[in-house]
Image (cartoon, grey):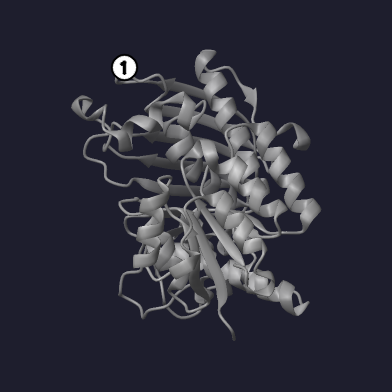
Amino acid sequence: MKKLKWGMIGGGEGSQIGPAHRLGSGLDGLFEFTAGALDHRPEQGIEYGQRLGLGERAYGGWQEMLEAEKQRGDDKVDLVTVATPNSTHFEITKGFLEGGFHVLCEKPMTMTVEEGEEIVKIAEKTGNICAVNYGYSGYSLVRHMKAMIARGDIGKVRLVNAEFAHGHHADAADADNPRVRWRYDPALAGVSAQFADCGIHAMHMASFVTGQEVTKLSADTVSCLAQRVLEDDAMVNFRMDGGAVGRLWTSSIAIGRQHGLGIQVFGETGGLRWSQEQPNQLFYMPLNQRLQVIERGEANLSPEADRTSRVTIGHAEGMPLAFANIYTDLAEAIQARKEGRAMDPAADLYPKAVDGLRSMAAVVAVAQSGKSEGAWLDARPPMFQ
């Protein structure tokens, strides 16, 4: 099979997320890194792109890349990843979707719910794929958890407990570090900091594994560092459309916590627990039985888990490989469209524009609820109310 062509906006030298996307996109040999506008500084972006082998397709800006790639016809990139600061996601994603490209956008997809609804409508109108990088949903055992819940292994879901807490922004002396400061600046981050940065990963995970959507929520938000305008800690209670109750904690000042993404799901006949820092194990407790440890790569897992496991049991698979599973999903979706066939249902799990929209609505609701002493608010976008 001929490799698909992949391009990237942002993710330049020194970027936190750029290397993970470059590793993930190329891991399975399905995409070739072909084009990029990697830095908001044109000269640095071109120079770095050329060092990575992009040649004349290393561009000085995303607008230049968009116009040049549109002129390449069948040789244009098949998928563009947007890995820029939050405030630019909408404009760039909109431009490439309307220009005829499939897009994978980093989260949050937009800064406002209205922008999110517009992206959903543009994707529907153009027929182009718009995916959102909730990359942790690519982990093999997260997908197996989803399959177990869907087939009824724990019965009807009663309670979901999700968290994403770390302590890497706890040092007040680090408040002016540019890599930290922008996350708490409303002009760049929007209405929320920690929940928009990390909490929505946990909330998306809750919806992803349960197959239920959040309908309403109540939030307690706080800026533990007084100089911050936006929150660095949040506790969110939520309700889901299938009847599940949800609890979510997210923090950036939890000293001693490293990555801290985890989820527990409790049903009528069993419970499941998974942590991103120990991604090779899924803990399963059937009602009135002994605890079972499910290992990534073991026999008789679901097709969704088998498809997304690359190395033998007992060896670690990490975050870039989870990202790679999002890219393999997208490669299958793009190839299916090119070939006029249905895609493999086990691959139709990549987060879509509607997921990005729902997350943005939750971000806004958390920010508003936090300012209203925890008032319960509708967490759905208007188009889904």
In this view, the residue farthest toward the top is 372
Query: Looking at the rendering, which quadrant does residue 130 occupy?
Result: bottom right
Can you give x and y, in whole percent of width and height, for residue 319 in the image? Answer: 38, 60
Q: Is residue 133 left or right of residue 97?
A: left
Instruction: Using the image as rendered, state which of residue 289 and residue 233 is in the foreground.
Output: 233
Residue located beneath label 1 in the image: 227
Nearer to us in this view, 270 or 308 = 308
Q: Residue furthest right?
A: 125
Q: Residues within 10 Å of mark 1 (few under 14, many from 20)?
A: few
| Left or right of residue 121, residue 105 in this image | left
**Measuring 39% from the left and 41% from the top, which residue is drawn there?**
164
Q: Which residue is rendered at x = 32% and y = 47% of the image? A: 259
Count the marks: 1
Q: Quadrant of the C terminus?
A: top right
Farthest-out residue, bottom: 1
Judge from the rendering whether residue 84 lies leftward or rightward of residue 94; answer left or right.
Answer: left
State the residue at coordinates (64%, 53%): 96
User: In this orientation, does residue 242 appear?
Assistant: yes
* x and y percentages locating residue 263 in the rendered image: 44, 48
Q: Is residue 151 visible?
A: no
Up-down relation of residue 117 to residue 337 (above or below): above
Residue sitting nearer the eye, 48 or 242: 48
Query: Residue 332, position in %: x, y?
Result: 63, 73
Label 1 sits on what residue type? Gln
Question: Compared with residue 251, is residue 131 higher up or lower down, i.e. above or below?
Answer: below
Of residue 266 and residue 319, the one placed in the foreground of this image is 319
User: Dot 1 lies on which element?
Assistant: loop
Which quadrant does the N terminus fall into? bottom right
Q: Position of residue 352 (x, y in %)?
A: 64, 53
